[in-house]
Image (spheres, grey):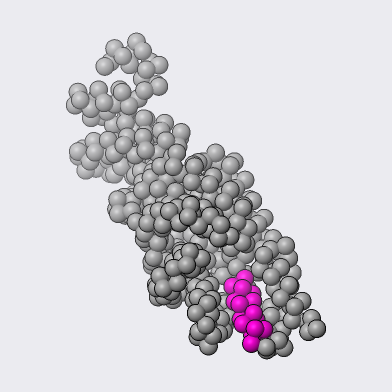
Amino acid sequence: METITQNFPSVAEEQPELIARHWTEAGEKELALAAWKKAAEIAFERHAFKEAEEEYRQALTIIRTLPETSEREAQELELMIRFVQVLQATKGWAAPEAADAAARAQTLAEKTNNLAQLVLQTTGLFATLVASADYPTASAVADRVLDLAKREGSPAILGVAHSCQITVCYLRADLNGAENYFAAGSTMLEPAGKIFSSALGAGFGYGSHTAWMRGFPDTARDRMRRAIAGATNLQSPFELAYVQWLAAGLQLFLRNFELAKTAAAASVALSDERGFQLFAAGARLFLGLAEAADGHQLDAAMPKIYSGFRGLEESALGSTTSFLGWLAAVEALAGKAAQSLETVERALQANPTDYALPEAMRIRGELLLSQQRTEAAEEDFRDSIALARNRGAKAWELRSAISLARLLKERGERTAAQDLLAPIYGWFTEGFDTADLKDAKTLLHELNNRA
C-alpha cells in the first residue's frame, strides 16, 4: 500500500477510496480514516452525494472505534457536518437517519462550544422539523438558531438564521414575519448558501412565495429569478434542484402551467440524476399538477401526481394542507368527486396554522358548489376570505372573492358581487398579467355590464 502511495501518487490522488479500502483491510485506522475522509470530501465537492454518503459512513465507523477524547469528538463533528447535509440530500430532511445524524451533530457542536457549527447543526435539526411539518417546534428552534447566530455575528451564519425564520414564518402563515426577515436578511442569503445547503433556496424561494401570497406577484417573480441565479452561481445541483421545485410551486400559484412544467421537469431530471429523493417526489407532483391543470393530460398526469405524493408522504410532507389541497383539486378534475372531498377534509384537518388553509377552504367550497350545495359552498368561501384577510394573504383573498362573486352573480346578486370583488381587486398594484387578476377584471366587467 505504501508502494502504491509513493510510486503511483496519481492513483492515491484520483482514487482515494481504493487507498482507503486497502488501509481499512490492513487495520491501519488512522491512515484509513484520513483516506475515507479525503474520498468523501472529493465526492461531496463533486455533489456526488451517494458516493459521499458511503464514504462518510466508512470514516465515521472507524472514528467511533477510537478512544473517546475531545480530539476525537472534534474530528467526528467535522465529518458529521457534511454527513448530515448528504443524508438530507439523499434521503430527505425528515428521514429518521438524517434526523438522528442532525441530533448527534448538534450534541457534538454543543460539546465543542463552536458557535458557527452549533448554528449549522441546529439548523439541520430545524430542517428535519420543518420537513416533518412540526412547525411550532421548528419555530422555537429557529429562534435558537437566530440567537446563536447573533452571538457568532458573521453574515453567512446570520443568513442561515434568517433563512430559517423566513421558512417557518411563511409555513405558519406569519406573512408579515416572513417578509420582515426577508427584508433584513436577503443580502446574507447567498453567503449563507455557501455554508449550508438549501439556505439560499429556502430564503429566496419562500421569500418569493411570501411576496405572492401578500399580493405582490411581480416581486415574487423577481425574487425567484434571484433564487435561480444564486443557485446557479453556487454551482450546487442540490440547491438548484430545490430552487426549481420552489419555482414550479410559484408558477402553480400564478397558474402559469407551462412555466410550472418547465421548472418541475428541470428539478425532476436533476433530482433523479443526483438521488435527491424529496425534491424528486415534490417536483414530480408539481409536474403532474401542471399537466393536469387544463384537463387534457389527466391520464398521463395522475401517475406522476400519485407517485410524487407517495414520495412526499414518506418524508411526512404529504400530510400537509397544501399538498392535500392540490391533490383534492386534481382528483375533482379527474371526476373523483367523493374522493376529492375526503382528501380536502384531510387537508383542512392537517394543520390549523398552515399557510394554505384558506385555499383548502375555497377548494372545498368549489367541490360543494359542483354538487349544488350552494349554502355550504358560500360559507366556505366567506370563511376563506375572512381567514385570508386576517393573515394578510391577499392572493388567497382575491381567489376566494372571485369564487364567491361568481356564486352571487349566478344567484342574481350582482351588486353584492361587485361590492365584494371591487375593493380587493383595487388593492393590487402589480401583477395584472396574472391569471387571478385577469379573471377578477373580466368578472368585474361582466358585473358592470348589466345590459
Q: Residue at 26% across / 26% down in the picture?
A: 21
Q: Magenta includes 219?
A: no
- Toward which corner of the image does residue 2 lie, by quadrant? top left
Res 410 visible: yes
Instruction: Find residue 150 and report its horizontal and vertical position in percent.
Output: 50, 59
Frontmost residue, 195 versus 309 = 309
Instruction: Find residue 145 and report its horizontal and vertical position in percent.
Output: 44, 60
- Toward which corner of the image does residue 311 lie, by quadrant? bottom left
Q: Quadrant of the C terminus?
A: bottom right
Instruction: Find residue 427 and report its horizontal and vertical position in percent.
Output: 72, 75
Q: Residue at 52% across / 73% down in the picture?
A: 363
Res 88 visible: no
As drawn, 199 above or below 168: above
Please indicate whether residue 185 sits to the left or right of residue 446 in the image.
left
Q: Which residues are magenta?
A: 395-411
Q: Main secondary structure of the magenta part?
A: helix
Q: Residue at 78% across / 81% down in the picture?
A: 448
Q: Magenta includes 408?
A: yes
Frontmost residue, 192 versus 264 = 264
| Residue farthest along the top direction in this orientation | 7
Frontmost residue, 325 versus 25 = 325
Instruction: Find residue 382 and report its horizontal and vertical position in percent.
Output: 57, 84
- Toward which corner of the image does residue 6 lie, by quadrant? top left
Q: Residue at 36% across / 23% down in the picture?
A: 15
Please indicate whether residue 9 sits to the left or right of residue 257 in the image.
left
